[in-house]
Amino acid sequence: MLMRDLSRPLETDIPADALLEVQHLTMRFGGLVAIDDLSFTARKNEITAIIGPNGAGKTTVFNCLTGFYKPTVGRLTLNHPDKGPFLLERMEGFRIAQKADVARTFQNIRLFSRMSVLENLIVAQHNRLMKASAFSLAGLLFMKRYAKAEKEAVELAKYWLDKVGLYERADWDAGNLPYGDQRRLEICRAMCIQPALLCLDEPAAGLNPRESLELNDLLMSIRDDEGIGVLLIEHDMSVVMQISDHIVVLDYGRKIADGDPLAVRTDPAVIKAYLGEDEDEAIPEDIVQDLGLSTRTGGTKQGDGGNA
Amino acid sequence: MLAYFLQQLINGLTLGSIYGLIAIGYTMVYGIIGMINFAHGEIFMIGAFVSVIAFLVLGALDITFIPLALLVVLLAAMVFTAAWGWTVERLAYRPLRGSFRLAPLISAIGMSIALQNFVQISQGARVKPIQPVIQGGVVLFTGDEGFTVVMSYLQIFIIILTVVLMAVFTWIITRTSLGRQQRACEQDRMMAGLVGVNVDRTISLTFVMGAVLAAVAGLMVTLQYGVVDFYIGFLAGMKAFTAAVLGGIGSLPGAMLGGILIGLIEAFWSAYFTIEYKDVAVFGVLVLVLIFRPTGLLGRPEVEKV
């Protein structure tokens, strides 16, 4: 190569177990500071949750990570387990998915609704398919290799469909699936990119309690069985507290707490951010529960997720 | 009477195939970036000019074996016209992506005028004739009143080539990775980028595919009428656009169906009514479609375009 690939840092001081290192990320929109000097680390094989009240800047962090916004200040290093470090803030949107293997889902579902369930999963694997067909219409000339690549793509799609119990509906139009299935399909599609980092924006939004338990199982399986780091934005504290290894709390674009679930939920700054400053008032019981202040224990790990 | 009707049917189908091939370029581009590429008629005109030039070059080289000559001209027209289509997108539309919605449309109209004038200046304003390449035909039968129904070899060539191209394109769109990417871009461009689809390249390839089909249509018109000039792109482009709207813009089978219907309307109107008003009839159809069925025959109802 004539020029150095600017998206690859010459050297990094990032710890080996870090997957994503966000350093001094600041995002300004005119006079509005959406994110103010945010630094945190998401480690490999961990679920890292970003929580915070509405408007805290959580989704903006995701938008910076996936290339929708160019951060005003800051460095976002993805320490890819196989390919080495990438500087995400220097990469074009689609290359972040293509090269650095960062996958993302949205708060509102964004499937390709007029494509079949299976096609949704195969389009996410097109990079391998395009390579097999020599990047062009030459699919005709490389029939055999292309057919093999396509077969592998279908196999991977089947694996994920089976895992979330959508195998029977592989031929449905994605837009006709029930809401909960669409959510799961979106996660499957992100997994078919074979990501190094999976970013989920409120995956439990709109799910009923049972579906939300299944989601917990799915996410833990992605972490434990697939060994993929997950970055999660979530409002549903029952999800966050149960499955996160590490929680980052934002308020008005600033980090106010960072640590394991136990440390975060007892942090006075977090309670203040969620409930306001008035200390005379007792915290209502249901809010205490929502925040997960009461201790919840096991029993959910053997849920029936996946074979529904 | 029946013989006359059949003859018009054959003529209409031939003409319709040509309109359909051009209409696909409009409909694919509209599907993927929501813009009417008004320069597409000029791309077709360039395809016709490249065909004429290629025929002249082959004539000068004394290559007279017709199937070989046709193949060479077809490939030359496809390659050069595709390069034009790609360049137009790169220069006139891509820099305006993300600008306000009318900007690429205005740019397209400008591009159309620019290309017309470029060809007029570089090739001259007079019509360019070529020798008939494919001659003769099959007499199907003679009707009661002594009217013979003839299907020329050229018409057979046009219809078969159109069917083959349609099959290939349907296969590309529905079965290949490229087609899947195009459909993904069409449905949600931002999300397509997030699953790693190179959206800009996919859009470029869409323009290239549209230009390739327009080039084939240009070759067909050159063979059919034997003359081209710098202005043929305008009317043919408008009619193909009408065909795309009639079939439902954004829908590939719709574009082909619309093209054939427009071809048939034109042929039958010319045969049974007044030939001077055939264009009025065609564009009258456009008006009626826009009033009574704005989504076209096979189009989806517009839900919301993000």
Image (cartoon, helix red, strand yellow):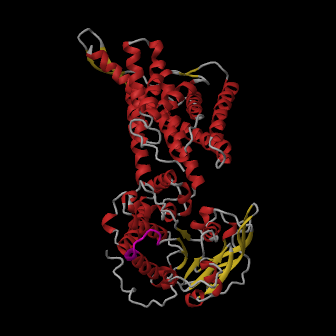
Q: Is residue A160 visible?
A: yes
The x and y percentages for residue B180 are 46, 55
Seen in the picture, residue B150 relative to B71 is either above or below; the reply is above
Q: Is residue A189 left or right of residue B127?
A: left
- Which percent across, then down, holds residue A148? 41, 66
Asked if residue B123 is among those painted magenta in the image, a careful observer would answer: no
Is residue B157 something that shows in the picture? no
Report x, y in % for residue B175. Answer: 40, 54
Q: Is residue B49 left or right of residue A177?
A: right
Q: Does B124 appear above or below A71? A: above
The quadrant in which the C terminus of chain A is found is bottom left
Furthest-top residue in this view:
B145
Q: Is residue B226 above or below residue B208?
A: above
State the residue at coordinates (73%, 80%).
A11
Magenta segment's dominant SS is loop
Give the residues in magenta: A204-211
In the rendered image, the quadrant that contains the N terminus of chain A is bottom right
At horizontal 66% and vertical 75% (from top left) the residue drawn is: A251
Where does the image place residue B30, in percent across and percent down from the top left?
52, 42
Residue drawn 36% across the image and 13% down it? B272
Q: How many marks?
A: 0
A185 or B66, nearer to the observer: A185
